[in-house]
Amino acid sequence: MERYSRVFYINDNFYLDNSPVIILAGAILKDNSTDELIGQLKLKSLSNKKIESVEIELELYDSSGKKQEKKVRHEFLDLNISRNEEFGSNEAIKLPYENSKSFKVNIKKVIFSDGESWNNKKAYYKLEEQESLNSILKTDELKYFKKTYGIYSEYIPIKQKNIWLCSCGTINYDDEEECYFCKINKNDILNIDFEKVKQDSRAFKEKSKRTIIVSIMVITMLSLLLFVTGVIIPNKNYQDAKKLIEEQQYSKALKKLNKLPRNYKDTSEILKKCYISYAEQLIEEDKYEEAIDTYEKMDELDIIDFLDKQKYVTTTTYKYASYLESIEKYDEAYQKYAKVYNVYPYTGEDDLWWIEIRMSICAEGYIEQHNNSTDVKTYDYLLRLLKDPNLSHNSIAYKDYLSTYKRLYNVSCEVVINSEENDTSSAPTKIRRNGTDENSKLYFHYKVTSNIPNGKANLKTEYETYDDDDYFKYWGTEDEDRPEEISVPIGEWQLEKVESSSDWHRLVIYNDDIGEEICSSNEVHIVNN
């Protein structure tokens, strides 16, 4: 026994003037395992705006046609429905009675994606059913009609109140001059003279017979042409390509091969080998970017496995980096090495540690070429070298980098502590607490001077405070576990505020690029009034 049986069914279109939704069908189904009834609806959007939700109302009737007391309200939510899309048929609407035999449907509210809504209190009416075109046209006449008015034509077009129904079955509003779906002109389709269609169909049929004879002659000529283009010319291109490959003229050979169908003899295999040979030739000529483009082209043509392509590209990029390093284009070489490093595991002869060495050498080479404090990249490369976790701070290399950094950027600072927010000059060693307030507000003022090219210095601040019983050290002014880097404008006073009940205070400023202390305030003693 089937789980559901049909109690009621409507298959007519119901509509209301200017409604954004049309009712296509509806049904009542009985769950044979529980005797419960559920309703189903099939709706379609007529709106040019996307529909987000629809609220409907069902008016229920028993077997005698008597209206039942409870009306059912249901919402179709989260729809995102565009025009001509159908919805609702996969959603069950639970009905309150077990003896409902029919219903009437009304669309109460439609909400659109832009937040606007359409509200309704009127009843929907049944639309006139469209008749099929094959009820008035024969097979040949219908074919001619579709050829003239569109392949989707199935129905006799009609106009009803403020809508018109196209021959493709699409419902359009009266002010729409062409069908939303098939784009045919409204006046053309609504004013069709079907008798003329039949006459034109017969004339077209006679003309087609005469055309057949000419077509046979054309087919004969085409067959000869196809033999030339499908056999003779491909074979010539194939043979020419093989000869060009023997002569190592790979670029010309590729042009010939790309004219051939991929399934012509062993074209795919030869094409792949030719592309690889061409790329290797370009590498020998130091044309690395063109070689990489050649491997990418193979990927686009789907004649190379992605991982194989990645291997070729990575190997070529490494060779390109080595070439750039050899002609002292250190910045470009560094970027190429970095690209190889980022797609490790590297498939060439060298390991990651060697690529790291090459990158460091390129950074050093760039710094030597641009040994001045105005070049941003010089600063960036120095930082990368100084912060290399594999480089010992006791090594000669690190000390050389540090010496260059200090010579170029000369980072220094001033720092004072006082009780005034806008005072950057007073640096008292003793401050009295204000009244009976146990806490006193302190202001830490500091200014950095340097030749760093981006106009900002990377710092860490350490705040020390203690009294007779305890000693505390804070990174920053808020959190003792915050040794985080801060970037401050060079040549401008910075301000940090703290409230503390401790007796002694001091601020220390570190250059975070190299981890060294660059200045500190006097020790300030807070005393009671």
Image: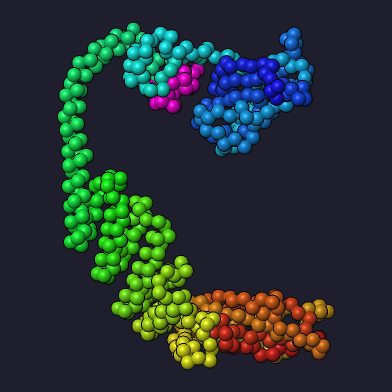
Q: Residue at x 21, y 59 (%)?
A: 245
Near-viewer residue (393 or 112): 393
Near-viewer residue (503 or 378): 378
- Note whether residue 332 is visible: no
Q: Residue at x 41, y 25 (%)?
A: 182
| Vertical placement of residue 222 versus 497, above or below | above
x then y, percent, for residue 237: 19, 48
Q: What main secondary structure does the magenta stretch of the protein show?
A: loop
x then y, percent, for residue 505: 71, 86
User: Image check: 18 left or right of 436?
Assistant: left
User: Image check: 294 left or right of 240?
Assistant: right
x then y, percent, for residue 267: 28, 50
Which quarter of the rendering shows the N terminus? top right
User: Image check: 318 left or right of 470?
Assistant: left
Q: Residue at x 18, y 57 (%)?
A: 244
Is residue 161 highlighted in magenta?
no
Q: Residue at x 21, y 49 (%)?
A: 238
Which quarter of the rendering shows the C terminus? bottom right
- Note whether residue 473 is visible: yes
Magenta stretch in the rendered image: 162-185
Is residue 171 highlighted in magenta?
yes
